[in-house]
Amino acid sequence: MTDEPRPAASVDEPPGRAAETRRSRRGVVIAAVALLVVAAVVIGGVVPRLKAMAALRRETYERAVWTVSVTRPRQGTPQQEIVLPGNMQAFTDAPIYARTNGYLKRWYVEIGSSVKAGQLLAEIEAPEVDQQLQQARADLNTARANSHLADVTASRYKGLLSTNSVSKQAVDNAVGDFEAKQAIVLSAEHNVKRLEELQSFQRIYAPFDGVLTARNVDVGALIDAGSGAPAREMFHMAATGRLRVYINVPQQYSPAARPDLVAELTLPEFPGRRFHGTLVRTANAIDVASRTLLVEVDVDNPTGELLPGAYAEVHLVLPSDTPSFVLPVNTLIFRSQGLQVAKVEDGSRAVLVPITLGRDFGNEVEVSTGLTGGERIIVNPPDSLISGETVRIAEAAGEAGAPHP
C-alpha cells in the first residue's frame, strides 16, 4: 500500500510539533466516532421504550372504558295473560245425613250414578218411631173426645144459664175447660205431625240433580240421626253440570280481575284442549297471608268429563291500562338502591335508571315503570358500573357483543 500523501510540513514547524498535531486530530476523530456510536445506541434503546410507554398509556385508557353491548326494550302487549293454578269444585256439594235413628233397610243408588232431585236413595227401618206415631195418634183421639165432651158440657151450661139454673161461675168453668181441651187437641195434632215428619225421614231423597260421589253405609248398618258424633255421613252428592274453579290472583293484577272476564282452562288429562269459563265473582278483599284475591270462575260441564276436585291451570287475559316493555333478565342490576337498568345516553355515557317489574317470563321480564321504549339498555352491565361513566358500544366499535372484563 502506498502511504497517503501527507501535507508538507511548514518549513518553520519543527518535526515534533507536526507529529503531535496529527495525533490530536486522530483523537478528535475517534471521539466523534465514539459519540456517534453512543448516540446511536441511546436512540435505538430509548425510542422503542417511549413508543411502548405511549402504546401502554393508550391501551390503559382504552381498557378503562367499558365496551358494552346494548338492546332496546320490546313493547309489551296491551293485554297480559297470567296462568294460575285452580281447584275445581262442584257447583253444589252436600253430605247427606239421616234425621231419624234406625237400621238401614235398603239403598237404591250406587256411587257414580246420576240422580234427579227427589229420587229415593235409601230407606231406614225405625220401629220405635212408628210406635210413637201410633201412640201420638191415640192420644190425639183421646184429646178430641175430651174436647168434644167439654164442648157439649159448655153448651149445656150456657143454655141453663139463661134460666138461672146454674151460676155464672159454673158456666165459666165449663167454657174454660172446653178451651183447655181444645189446646190439648192442638198440641196432640202437632205431636202427630212431628212424628209423621220424623217417620218421613226414614226415606232418604236426593236434594238436587247430581252425581252420588260416596256411599258410606250398607244394609243393616245402625243409623244415628244428625251430623254430629257419633253420626256419620250416609251419602255425598255433587252437582257437576257446572263447576266452580277457585284461583288466587296476585294483588298487582287484582284491579283487572273483573266479573264477566273470559277464562280458559287446561288440564293435564286433556292435552291440547281448552275449556271456556267466565269469571263470575271475587272476594273483594285481599288475603293478608298470601296477598292474593280469591276469584271464582264458572265452567259449564254438560258432558260431565270434568271432575270435581281436579287440578286445572286457568289462563286469564287481563287488560292493561299502562304500557309495558320487555327486557332480557341479564340487563337487570340488583343493588341496595333497588332494581335498576343501565342505559346509554349521548352515545357514550351510562345512566342508571330505577325500574319496576311486572311479570316474570323466565328469560325475560316485564317492566311496568321506568322506561319509555327508546332507550339503549346495556346487556350484562359490569358490577362496578356507575351512573355517568363513559362506555363504548360494541356494535359501534365493531367488537364482540360481550362486555369488556
Image (cartoon, helix red, strand yellow):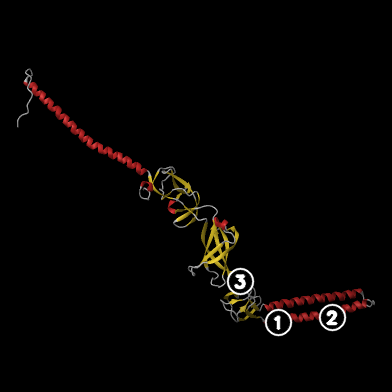
User: Which residue in the structure is indicated by mark 2?
Assistant: 149
203 displayed left or right of 190? left
Near mark 2 (Cα within 10 A), the count class, few <14, some 14-19 or many ≥20, is some
User: Which residue in the structure is indicated by mark 1?
Assistant: 131
Give the distance between the C-alpha atoms of the residues marked 3 and 1, in whole angstroms.
32 Å
Q: Nearer the viewer, residue 359 or 93?
A: 359
**Count of labels shown?**
3
Q: Name the quadrant containing residue 281.
A: bottom right
Q: Residue at x 67, y 82 (%)?
A: 127
Residue at disc 3, secondary structure: strand
Q: Is residue 22 above or below residue 211?
A: above
Kindly indicate whether the residue at mark 1 contacts the one at mark 3 (C-beta within 8 angstroms): no
User: Which residue in the structure is indicated by mark 3?
Assistant: 94
273 displayed left or right of 167? left
Q: Residue furthest right?
A: 163
Q: Nearer the viewer, residue 337 or 225?
A: 337
Q: Residue at x 85, y 78 (%)?
A: 151
Residue at disc 1, secondary structure: helix
Q: Quadrant of the N terminus?
A: top left
* Dot 1 amino acid type: Gln
Nearer mark to the viewer, of 3 and 1? 3
Q: Residue at x 89, y 75 (%)?
A: 171
* Dot 2 amino acid type: Leu
Residue 256 visible from this viewpoint: yes
